Image: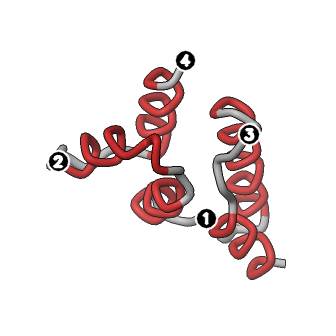
Amino acid sequence: MYQDIKVELTRMKLDDQGVKKYLHNYKLLIDQLKEISKPIDDEDLITFAIASLPREYESFIIANANDPSPISFDVFRNKLLFSWK
């Protein structure tokens, strides 16, 4: 179960569903991992999320890569959500 959820998390792509729906589905998977006591650290969650973004999010990706301070996944999620409203 852990591997299945983690694979699904790493294969998610932001596509026509929109940012809000994508982030909701991403959070559901994160919560499933927490429920089985297999949480993934924020750095990996952010890395997986960045890898799932299409080309039109390149400026968002670069801006986050140039920010030297570590952030939580919740902060990243909010930045992504509010960047693309």
Q: As drawn, is 25 to the left or to the right of 59?
A: right
Disc ID at residue 16: 3
**In the image, is 6 to the left or to the right of 44?**
right
Which of labels 2 and 1 is toward the front? 2
Mark 3 to mark 1 CA distance (whole Å): 28 Å
Q: Estimate how packed mark 3 is, as few (under 14), some (14 to 19) or many (20 or more) residues with alpha carbons within 10 Å.
A: few
* Percent x, y of residue 41: 48, 63
Q: Looking at the picture, how far across and down is residue 72, in whole percent? A: 40, 45
Q: Earlier in the sequence, mark 1 or mark 4?
A: 1
Q: Which residue is mark 1?
A: 39
What SS does tag 4 mark? loop
Q: CA distance from mark 4 to mark 2?
A: 22 Å
78 relative to 67 in the view: left or right: right
Quadrant of the image containing the C terminus:
top right
Coordinates of residue 18 in the picture (x, y in percent): 69, 33
Check disc 4 and report the residue beneath it: 85
Q: Which residue is mark 2?
A: 66
Residue at figure coordinates x 69%, y 60% from the top left: 12
Instruction: Please tell me which residue is depicted at 74% across the width and 34% down the height of the picture.
Output: 21
Q: Nearer the viewer, residue 37 or 24?
A: 24
Q: Secondary structure at mark 1?
A: loop
Q: Looking at this view, name the residue that lies furthest to the right.
A: 1
Name the residue furthest bottom.
Answer: 3
